[in-house]
Amino acid sequence: MSKSSVLSRLANLPERLGEMITGRRDGIKALLAFTRFSGVIRHDPRQYDRQQRELILLGRLLLTFLRSPMISLARDVAMLAEGLGDERTFAAMMRRAIADAGRLETRLRQKPGSATLLVDFQISLMDFDAAKRVIGAIRDTRPELANQLSQRVADLEAECKPWRDVVDAACASLRRRLQGGATPLQERLTVHVPVAAFRMNHRDYPGFREDIRRSFRQIVSVLRENGTSYSVEMRVAKHGALADEGAFIAYHTVGGEGRGLHVKETDRRSHFSGDTGGYSGWSAFSDKPLPPADAFDPAVVAAFISSERQQLIAGNQSKYLQPETGPDRPAGQYVFVALQVIDDAVQRQAALHMFDMLEEVSRACAARGIAVVVKRHPLCRSAAVRFVLAKGVRRGLFSLTEGSIHDLIDGSCAVCVINSGVGAEALLHGKPVYTFGRAEYQAATFRIRERGEFARLFVPDRLPAPAERIEALLYALRHSYATDVRTEDEALAFWRDRLSGVLGKG
């Protein structure tokens, strides 16, 4: 085994160790899956916060003994702590991450390869000057890498020019926060600029981080045209409840008793929601009933549905890259089950554990002689999920596929999800959808709230409401709940409307 391979395995050790320890409940649930004891461990939304607290404790313990620079681990622990409102741990872990970055920077002449990690880190904290300082330190030893990183920073600076003062203010707010300085007088509105807008992840769809930045740049533009004063803070956490005393704008958050505007990408690339409750099943939109068929101009809705089907279904487009469509999709009648990442924040909204959903659907369909086809989430790396899927296939309960989501939906007689965006795509196909958790589009689905309910409700190819009302909800989902941030004028109009509501409550 090469040295680089060994180092790579060691780098992933904390994450793997964390999954084994905090995911033990899912591991036990996996062992009991499809047996008479599967219901012994019930779904408990509180387990996700407990898992995060355990990850924080584990991360802090590892960082106590691992004195070598561990920038990513320290920042990830800080991210979890902020999401749970643990300010003391957040500050301690962010100080550790920044200190470790400083230690690595002093070694750049000996290890110039660390420059990419350091530039990524400094950019994520919106500190472009620090990123350029790192690049300058390797200019002589690694000129090609320095030029590559310089171009990246220059491109970001050019893109952020219209709202650079806000980006710089977010960076300054973090320094002030970590130093324990006095907090400036808060305005009635706080803009929480997300670190997620500047982080890199190879699993993103192309342009995803740029879309987050574009959303906040548009929001800032609307605030300026209205002459609205606001405070600026940096937010590191990627999920959490916010309870600011005044109005606020934040990304990937929930809560705030209607005073906040929660910004979040949706199932559709470049489409971002702005909701006063949160996203997915936390959103205020999710509580709305199906709109009447005449809520919108029927001709406009029909044209919209036709266009969406042409772009997404005929174009084989989804949030994640799909394989080519083809004739090898499952034959015969089947129910399609789309799985999610088992520790995703939206699992807090599930009525049943994902493994229980698999059991409910497979057993109900077996009684009717209907096959079940399952697709694992493309970003899932859980050993427990892998174990359960292998067990289910061995027992003949379902088959696995990696085919195109659109092929799989198209050939199905029903689609089952917790609250995945696949559910919204299935509605576009005109398929009945069974949701086992709260979702923004839940009014157009059969909602499963307890064990045994799927077996009682399931009828192949039966819709829960007239097709025209479901299509009206899809129209509202794309125009009232979210906007395509790459259509500038429409997006600005959307943010104006959303901000007027939030500022009126602040």
Image (cartoon, helix red, strand yellow):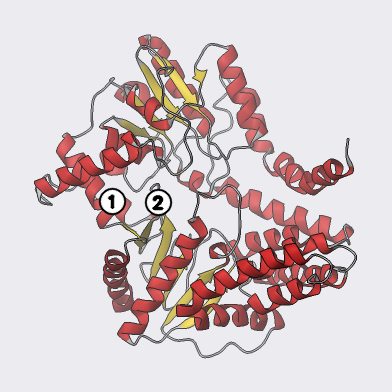
Q: Nearer the viewer, residue 57 or 170?
A: 170
N-term mark: 2 or 1: 2
Q: Residue at x 55, y 40 (%)?
A: 341
Horizontal and vertical percent position of residue 223: 36, 80
Q: Which amino acid does label 2 sit on?
A: Thr
Horizontal and vertical percent position of residue 379: 57, 40
Q: Please tell me whether residue 216 is drawn above or below residue 409 in the rendered image.
A: below
Q: In this view, does 333 lie to the left or right of 106?
A: left
Residue 80 appears in the rendering: yes
SS under mark 1: helix
Q: Please tell me whether residue 22 is drawn above or below residue 120 in the rendered image.
A: above
SS under mark 2: loop
Q: Residue 266 carries which label?
A: 2
Horizontal and vertical percent position of residue 423: 36, 37
Q: Please tell me whether residue 375 is drawn above or below residue 35 in the rendered image.
A: below
Q: Residues within 10 Å of mark 1 (few under 14, many from 20)?
A: some
Q: What residue type is labelled 1?
A: Leu
Horizontal and vertical percent position of residue 468: 15, 39
> Which quadrant of the view contains residue 167?
bottom right
Q: Are marks 2 and 1 in contact (CB under 8 Å)?
A: yes
Q: Please tell me whether residue 252 is drawn above or below residue 139 in the rendered image.
A: above
Q: Which residue is drawn at 27% across and 38% down?
A: 309
> Which quadrant of the view contains residue 42?
top right
Q: Nearer the viewer, residue 317 or 195?
A: 317
User: Which quadrant of the rendered structure holds the C terminus?
Assistant: bottom left
Q: Residue at x 38, y 73 (%)?
A: 219
Residue linked to disc 1: 477
Say how many tags the image has.
2
Question: In 3D space, how far apart are the residues under numbered discs 2 and 1 (Cα atoms)?
Answer: 10 Å
Q: Residue 287 carries which label?
A: none
